[in-house]
Structures are given as structure tokens and as C-alpha cells.
Image: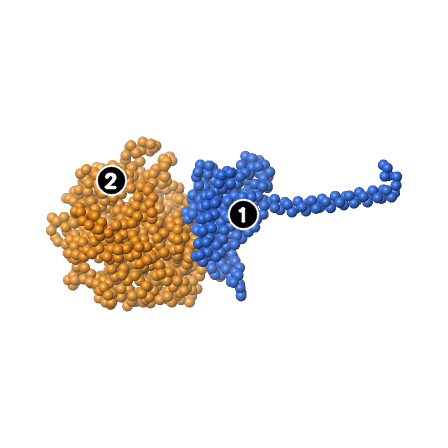
Chain colours: A orange, B blue
Amino acid sequence: MPGLGTSFGRGGATNTQQDLQNADAIMIMGSNFAECHPVGFRWAMKAKAKGAKLIHVDPRFTRTSAMADTYAPIRSGSDIVFLGGLIKYLIDNEKYFKEYVVAYTNAPSLIDPNYQDTEELDGLFSGFDPAGRKYNPDTWKYQSDLPPGQTQPVPAQDESQSFSARVGKLVGPPPKQDLTMQDPHCVFQIMKRHYARYTPEMVEQATGCPKDIFLKVAETLAQNSGRERTATVVYAVGWTQHTVGVQIIRAATILQLLLGNVGRPGGGILALRGHATIQGSTDVPTLYNLLPGYLNSPSALKTHETLRAYLDTEVTPTAYWANMPKFMVSMLKAWYGDAATAQNGYGYDYQPKIVGDHSHMPMFVAMSQGSIKGFFAMGQNPAVGGQNAGFQRKALAKLDWMVVRDLYETETATFWRDSPEFKGKSSDVKTEVFFMPAAAVPEGAGSFTNTQRLLQKHEKAVDPPDDARTDLWFTYKLGVRLKELYQSSTLPRDTGIKILTWSYVDPEENKQWRIPDEPSSDLVMREINGYTVSDKKMVKGFGDLKDDGTTACGVWIYSGIYAPTADHPDGFNRSAARTPGQIISPNWGFAWPANRHILYNRASADPAGNPWSERKKLVYWDANAPATDTQGKPTKGKWVGIEGEVPDFVATKAPTTPANPKGVGLDYHSGADPFIMKADGKGWLFAPQGLTDGPLPTHYEPYESPVENMLYHKQGVNPVAKLYDKLVPGNAYSPPGNPDYPHILSTYRLTEHHLSGSMSRWLPWLAELQPELFVEISPELAHEKGISNTQLVNIKTPRATIQAKALVTKRIRPFVIGGKTIHQVGMPWHWGYNGIAHGAVVNDLSALVGDPNVNIHEAKVFVCQIEKA
Amino acid sequence: MSDAYGFYTDTTVCIGCKACQVACHQWNELPAELEQQPTEHSPGQTRPMTGNSYDNTGSFSDVNWRHVKFIEKSEIPAMGTTAASVSHSPQDPNRDNLQWLMMSDVCKHCVNAPCLEVCPTGAIIRTEFDSVYIQEPVCNGCRNCVGACPFGVIHMGGTANEGEGTAKKCTLCYDRMQHGLTPACAQACPTESIQFGKITDLKVRAEQRVKDLHDLGFPQAQLYGADTKILGGLNSFYLLMDQPEVYGLPSNPKLPSRAVIPSTFLSMGSALLVALGGLFAFRKKRMEEFAADPTAKER
């Protein structure tokens, strides 16, 4: 989640669903909260019952809109105009929280005078390389006292120093600031100029949202923010699945920083994740570019040859990330055990390195080109869920082998037999397909990390039937067999598999069950927590970790989950804790990091450490409280959290502590810098680094749009979007304003089904509730095309044509964009050719095209034609 | 009898998730309504979509004891008046005050239950929780209750009665309540739209909620069935944001026996007339006989 990570420091929701009860206003945008997260929506309804104003900004009137006080309709893909309009409204009307903005954000920081904005370059930032379609971000940097031409300090060459000591050498001079925020090069002034044309009139023109409704939203947010009040922003994949997905989220972070809502109860940004434990799968990642705990994967394209080079490149020396060498070395120690020594970089030398973008879309391109031979589909159904799914099914046919592990025979498992491409032609498919029955969640123990970073253990309730096994069992067994296969290999590249620590079965735990060799999720969790190598004792948390090989820790951000206590000297799994409390509930599960529920909660107090208001009190400085400092000496004064909340700050660092320009890690920050993961301790309105497509969110039209960009003429779409039209036959894009594809199509989910339907379309009780694929169209479009309700229609895009039944509803509305009527239609994408409820694959229509930061596809907006079948 | 228990359904927080329908199916082991049920060799096949908003089960049935209704509604302001007529038609493009009302409908467990009144076999009883319960083994499948229910709750199903089936409806999870458990639907409801408890407590909560909604600027908020006006009170009552008819609920349903009384008087009146007519007829006949044969008096 680089949107949140770039602005605040961590890629996770800043608050909790329960915390919505503290909000005075909630803006849900890019999310159909009520339909896709119905259980969490209870907290939004509780907030509403307490008088909070609910705003829903969405192209469709959904079950969420039905619950909202204000529904603001906007055209799909115009989110940044709307959010930019809100930012401009706050600046122009001086409704931002000035004390918060000056103290806690980078608004006063000065940017390189050579920086040029999209306002000057008509849609481009300075540093664009048209040939390489990429930016050189050097002109986006802070002004500082570094020698000209040098962008960062050069590390010392003394190899004997410890990693942590070397970090200190990387500390550079702090950014220059103008606390009056008048300097034309300060972030505040740049931002003000950047959004100057995002007026309420422009919002109405470009988004289709009536001006009075937009202003009502702006006023509601402004009135419900400040010292006494807070507002929360809630989003989900309605924001991420765009070629500007990261920048939409960035725009929301700017909005919330200006309103002073981050780190405060009832404030922040609640990122609702797409499915169960998807937060967990980025924390302990199933991603190609990250190691556990958001450490970057070693890359052949960066200065990553050795562990030392990797750490020098990746460390942020002036933030809590200065401790990164401890996390990396401890992780390697957990993986490679005794074989991890200082000589072999603690096993770093055996780590595979990435050589480019290996995310989902490039992976399928590589598969279609025959360079990927084997594929495990575990909990994934790309034959339905993949973008341009017809292409992805054809790519599966190029594999030598594929393993599908699922509850039912999904469309992916039977693509060779049942897909439109291969039905009746299965002999054309050479791929050997292995279908392995998977156990369901209650058939094995484990944990979920939910949308708010909260880990909750689930117990095993029953043995899985027959040969069905848990993913943990399968992965463990796969590792055991690979180790056996490579045991006699002498190739250096195989060493990593040979030396991997791989012992997770607790026979005692399995005594009551039929399956004797099920790995213990508790043993896995103990390794995740970390231990001292000499005595295998559980560490108390990531603060105990060392960079000298004396500690091991699988996932540093989860460290502390198995911390020892007086009652449990050997530690206990805190994700199983079930003591309810108030809104924070510190003894219910375990929230990473260190059981902090509201991130950056130092910002809930003013710079002097006092709560901004009694009403919004959360964490504050108690000057008289007895405490012990980081060295263990008794002192006076500490940060205190109400309801048992853990301060997201150095516990005994007084608010008056000055910044030390030579300090390493958090010593570099003052006692009033709440964003401890950022190099300058500030929330970033302007992102001087970290993003590939610009330091400020700018409105670009979706890659396929029926209209031209009204704000920027030279550069109308994201200039660095990831494109696949040349790489993939049949993945053409429709140019702006193409009359062949005049309508906007958005895809989405329904409450009644889950994702590609592999967990719902086979269940009679769910299948009957939404039995068939449909396309939601407005009465106006239905009239124009002579389509009646439930009539079969053809939906066509440059990729494919599929059939669905029309659902004519006033909940869908046409938009007037720049004087032109634009029809938007919507399709839930749950169906496929298998199951009780089956239908066409909506993703056959979508395109491979990606956000440049994370390479997520643009399923929330593309263009189509629609006709009676 | 012990305290009356039941449901208070606050439709203002219903998000139409249908978790209640699924929980009801699951707990009561009711099958889905499919074109073709799954078998060992085939996954089965759903029925077609209805096209009526997101409602694809359509109504109560022998296996659907809960039914979530979806009402897409907008107002057409009438010329020169403040009164608004309601448009439900999806073909109408008007979006003034667009609303999507959702409501989870269920047996009302009426205090004066028409079904119970007309049941000839005593199959329908009132439980110790004041709920209305069908004892299936006693049901003879006469269907009187189906016609008597003003809410369309009861349907015939199963094969217990020589193919005719028996009457089926919500049991208020009588089996769960006997073990101190909340009914499955209320347990599953994520937003506490369906609240279960003692009727006296629920009424206090509901009245406060209506007051709060009025204060927040929603004068249309009203309770349905919380007082005794509808069938002596409904042990499953509702907070609605519009007239009951908008939700497909009758505003003034009647007990069968209330209709029986006037018709009884009418029948008695007719009988009297017939009797009088008879008397007159006999008298007339006798007069004629007497005129023809004056000695007949002695017979």
C-alpha cells in the first residue's frame, strides 16, 4: 500500500473499524462498505446512530449509498478531481487545521527550486523521460545543505563497523523549512498552485457531481474536523484498481493531513482490504517484491550484491527504519539458523534476487511467452479473476504443469475442459493439471490479519474430509520434499533450500486429530515473534532484535505477538487473546506494530503533548508519571494512552525534545514529530521520493475514457502507466472519445458472492441469492437502446464480447461531463463457467494495464458498447 | 405465561446483506430454491434472476422463512402540493430523493394470530415465549392458515401429508430459544437491524429510536405493530421510514373472527327473515285452509 506508506510511513489502515464510532463524519469513497464489508459496516452504523454524518461518493447508488446522509455521484475515474477540489476548498477557505499542518506535515518544507509542476508542463512533472516513459525524481527533493549535485551522504567504507553503526554515517542534513509557509518553494505553496484549477465548477464539469452536493461534502468534512471533532475516510479497491490508484489514495492522505485527522480517534484512513487476511498476505507477503515486514526483496537491478550493500541502499537512517539491519539479519537468522553466519551475510548470499516486475500481469505475459513452466494456484482463480481473463486462460495452456488447490473444481482447474477457448478442444492443452482438495478455514488452526492490522487466531474445529489438507500442510510438505530433492545438490544456488530451517510439526498438538503431520501454526507464530538464538527464549518485541546474529525473528512487525509475561514465561499467542475492552480493546487479538491500534497516535496530542481536546483525547504526555528510559534508568514523564492504547512513539521522549541533526534513527526527530517511519518525522503532503508517477496527485483520465482530460491537454493519462498492448495480442486499448465504445464500464462485487465465486457459486444458499450475471444500466440508456429489464444484452470491449441480463435501475445514472451525456454501466464479476450459479466471465472484457507503482489493473473503469443480444 | 419474546427490526440500518436468510436456511436445514438441486454428478442449477432489484427469492415460501425486500423508490413532486406520489418503476428516470429501502420480513408472531384462530386441528399453538408455532405432526394440510395470514407468511411444503405437505413458517427458532440462544437470523445480523429480546424491552428501545430519528429530521420514522392496533400487537414489529404499503405490509389487517361477527349478524338477520316469512307463509296457508274448510280447526 504505497499510497499510505509514502504519506504516513506504513502501508496499513491508520485506525480500526471499531474506531469509526469515534468519528463525527465518515466519507466512504472508492468503497461499497455496506456490501463488501457488511460485518465491519456495523461500526459505521453505530457512528451514524450517534449522530455522525455518513457521506458516500460513488458512481453507483449502492447499499452503502442507501445508508448515507449524503450521496455524491461521480463518474468512475474522476476521483482525483473530487479530492483535489476538496483540498482546494480547505486551502482557499482556510479550513485546514493550521497548527497540525505546520507542526506535523511537510507543508513548510522547501522543495528544489528546479521542480516544475503539472500546471507548468500541462500534465507532466519535471524530470520526465519520454523515451523511457519514466521520471527522474531528483527535482522533487527537499532543499537541504548537502553539497550541490549530491543527493545523499556516502556511506563509510570501513567494513569492520557494525551495520547499525554504519547507519549513522548515512544521516544527511535536515530539509529546509519556512514555518510561515509563504516561501514559493514550500510544499504548501506548491500544493496551492497545483490544485488552483480544481474549483467546484471544475469538479461539476469533470466528475458530474452537482456543485451543491460537492460543497455539502466539503463543508461537512470541514465542520467535523479540527480540535474538537474528527472525520474518517474509508476506501477499498474502488480506489486502488486504477492506473492512478496509488495517487488517489495519496490525495486522501493529503486531505486528512490538512484536516488534522491522522493519528486521532475517529480520524485517519481506513483501508478496507479486498478479502480475508489480505493485509496478512502483504505483511508476511505473497508478493514478489517484498520480504516479511515490508523489507524490499533483494534485486539484481539495485546495489544489492551483498548484505552490506543491500542494507546501505535500503536503510532510512533518520527514522525508526534505521533499525532495519536488525530486522533483516534477524529474519535471515530465522530462515537459515546455524547456517546463517557473518561470513555468508547470514544467508543473504543464498537469497534469490528479482530481475524486474514479476507481479501478476507480467507473470501471465511471461507464461504466455512460454518462459514460466509451472504454476501453483492456491486460493486464486485467475481464469475468472484475471484481467483480460481469456488471455490468461490461454496463457495457462502454455504451462507444463499447474497445481490448483481449492475447495471446488474452479474455472482455473478446468480451463482445459470447460473454458470457451478449449471446450471440445482439450487435446490442444498440454498442461498437466493437478487438482488438490484444500481444507476450509475451520479445518486447520491459523490466524487472520484483518483490515486494521489485527491478528486473530482461529482454532481447528474439525479434521478436513478425505485427502483435503490445509495450505500450511501443503506448503510444509512441499518444502520437505524440495529439501529432499536438493539434498545431494552441490550447486551453490540450491544452498538456500538445503539450509532452510523447516521444522514445524508438534506431534503432541496433533494427538486429538486424524492427521498426524499437520504443522503447528503456533510454532510458526513463535518463529514469527522471534527469539534469542542462544536459549530460544521468545523476545519481548522488535526492540530486542540485534544485527549480529544473536536474535532470530521471522516477521519483525509482528514481533511481540508471543512475548513472555509473568504468567507465561515461555510466551503465549496473543492473537488468541479474547478479552473485550472499550473501543481500543488491547487484549483482543494483537495489532501490529506492538499492539498499537491507532497509528501515529502521537498526533492525537498537540506539539506540547496535551490532547487537542478532551473530547478527542487518546495519547498524551504525562510529565509526572514515573518511567524508565531506553537505558533502563528511572525517569519522570511518559506518553500515556487511554483505554490501554500503546503510544506509537518513544515512550519516554518528552514533547520538548529537540531534533538532533546528527542523530541516528528517532534521535533525528524532535519530540513533536509523530510520523516515526518517515525520514523527517512528518506526514507527507508532497512526496519528494517513493513514487514513480509524481510527488502530487494529479487528475489523469482512466487509460480508457469516453472523454478527454479537461485539466491537462498535453498529457491526459498517466504518462508512466504500465502498458501491455504491444506485449499481448488482443489487449488493445480504446482511444479517448472513441464512438465505438461510448460507455463507461465498472466492475464490482456483491454481498451475496465472494470474489471469483469459488467460495460462493457452489453453495446453494448463496447461489440462489444472486443466480445470474447482470449488467446494471440506467433507465435512460435502456430507453435509448430499447433494452428492457432482464433482457439479454451483449457487452463489448476491444478485448471481448460477453452476454448478460440487463438490470434496469435508477440507481445507475448518466453523467453530464463537459456538456456531454456519458452513460456508465456496472457489472459484478463473480461468475464463471462452473458452479451452481454460472455465467460469462466479466474479466474477459477488462484490459491488462497497470498503475506504475504497484502494477494493479484498472478494473474500476474502462469503456464498452452495449446492445440487445 | 412467561415474558413475550420477539423481534424489533430497525429497517433504517438494514443493509440488505441477506445474512438472516442464509442463517435461517442453515439453522433450520432448509434447502435453497433451485431449478435443479446439486447431485453427486452435477453442481445443480439456479433459477433465473427476477430483475426485481436485488431480490431473487421473491417471497416467503415453504423454505424461505425470512425474505429481504428491496424497494427502489423516488418521489415525483406533485404540482402545487407538498404531497408526493411514489414511483417504484425502474423505467422511470426520476431520481428525486432516491431511496433504496431494505427490510427483512418474517412471521409477525401476532398477539391475535389469524393462523392460530383458523387452525382446525390445534397444530398452531402459542408457546411459552408468546411466539406462534406450527406443530407439524398435528397439521392436516387444510391450508386455512395460508389464507388467513394477512402477511403471506405461511406456505405448504414437504410431503408429510400425502403429497399435500404441512404448513411451514418461522418458528422464532423455538429450538434455540429453549436453550437460551438468540434466533439464528438476529444472531447473524451484522448491523443489529434485527434485534431479539423481551418485547417490553424492545418497545422501549424502538420508541427511543423513533424519537431520535424525529430529532435528526426524519419525521416519517414510525413503528409498525409495536402497539395493539395491528392484530393486538406484533411480536415481530418494525421501524419503517415510509407508509407500511411501501414495504408491502397491510396497514390495517383483520382477524378472520372480526369478519365473522358482522356476517354472523347478517346470517342471523336473514334467518329471522326466513323464519318470519315462514310464519307468515304458514299463517297464510292456514287462513286459506280455514276459509275452504272452517271445520279444519278441529283437526
Q: Mark 2 belongs to which amino acid?
A: Thr
**Point 55% across, 49% down: residue:** B229
Residue at disc 1, secondary structure: loop
Task: Give the x, y percent position of residue A257.
Answer: 29, 59
Is residue A342 shown left or right of residue B183? left
How far apart in space, not on screen, are marks 1 and 2 (Cα)? 58 Å
With B143 as the anchor, is A349 left or right in this view? left
Q: Circle 1 sits on which residue?
A: B228
* Residue A854 visible in image: no
Count of residue discs: 2
Q: Position of residue A868 (x, y in %)?
A: 48, 56
Left/right of residue B16 with respect to residue A646 in the rendered view: right
Chain letter of the residue beneath label 1 in the structure image: B
- How far across and how far down the image is residue A720, in percent? 29, 59
Amino acid identity at mark 1? Thr
On the same chain: label 1 and label 2?
no
> What residue is drawn where x is 34% and y is 37%?
A460
Residue B45 x, y percent position in the rendering? 47, 44
In this orientation, which residue lies closer to the viewer: A23 or A241? Answer: A23
Where disc 2 sits, the SS reads: loop
Q: Quadrant of residue A183?
A: bottom left
Say the numbered circle drawn on residue A127.
none
Q: Which residue is mark 2?
A: A565
Q: Is residue A170 above or below residue A437?
A: below
Looking at the picture, tell me which residue is in the foreground, A425 or A813: A813
